[in-house]
Amino acid sequence: MNDASPHPRHVRHVLVLPDRDAAEEVAEALTERFGLAEEPQLVRDALAGEDDAEDAQWLVVVEDPDAVHDAEQLHDLAAEHEGWREAE
C-alpha cells in the first residue's frame, strides 16, 4: 500500500502560552498574519495536579486542514509571547 496521498493530511498546531492575555494576542496576530479562515480556539490547560488558576497555561489551537501553515513561523510567533509550538 502506498502512503503517498494526493491530499495533504490535516494538521493541528497547538501553541502553548503562559497566560490568557498572551494567548489572545497570539490568536489575533494569527488571524492578521496568516489570514485564517477560522478563529483559533483558546483553551485553558491547568498543569497536572495544580488547582491554582495562575498555574494554568493557555493553548491556541489552529486547525490546518490543508497543511499550509509554516510550523517554524507559528513557533516564532508563540516565542514572541514567551510560548512555543507543540507538535500535534
Image (spheres, rainbow, N blue to C red):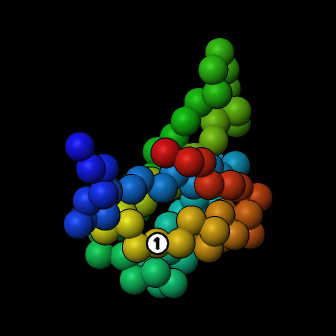
Looking at the image, which residue is at 46% across and 72% down? 69
Image spot of residue 31 (x, y percent): 44, 77
Image spot of residue 76 (x, y percent): 69, 69
- Image quadrant of residue 29? bottom right
Relative to 5, residue 26 above or below: below
Image spot of residue 85 (x, y percent): 62, 54
**Left or right: where does residue 76 sit relative to residue 9?**
right
**Residue 5 shows in the view:** yes
- Callout 1: SS: loop
Looking at the image, which residue is at 64% across and 27% down? 47
- The type of residue carrying mark 1 is His
**Left or right: where does residue 45 sit relative to residue 83?**
left
- Count of numbered circles on the image: 1
Q: Nearer the viewer, residue 67 or 59?
A: 67
- Image quadrant of residue 38? bottom left
Query: Few, some or many C-alpha atoms within 10 Å of disc 1 (few <14, some 14-19, many ≥20)?
Result: some
Looking at the image, which residue is at 42% across and 60% down? 62
Q: Nearer the viewer, residue 17 or 21?
A: 17
Quadrant into which the N terminus falls? top left
Q: Nearer the viewer, residue 34 or 22?
A: 34
**Left or right: where does residue 71 sit relative to residue 34?**
right
Label 1 belongs to which residue? 69
- Image quadrant of residue 21? bottom right
Residue sitting at the far front:
1
Q: Nearer the viewer, residue 33 or 56?
A: 33
Looking at the image, which residue is at 39% across and 83% down? 35
**Residue 21 shows in the view:** no
Relative to 59, residue 25 above or below: below
Residue sitting at the far top:
49
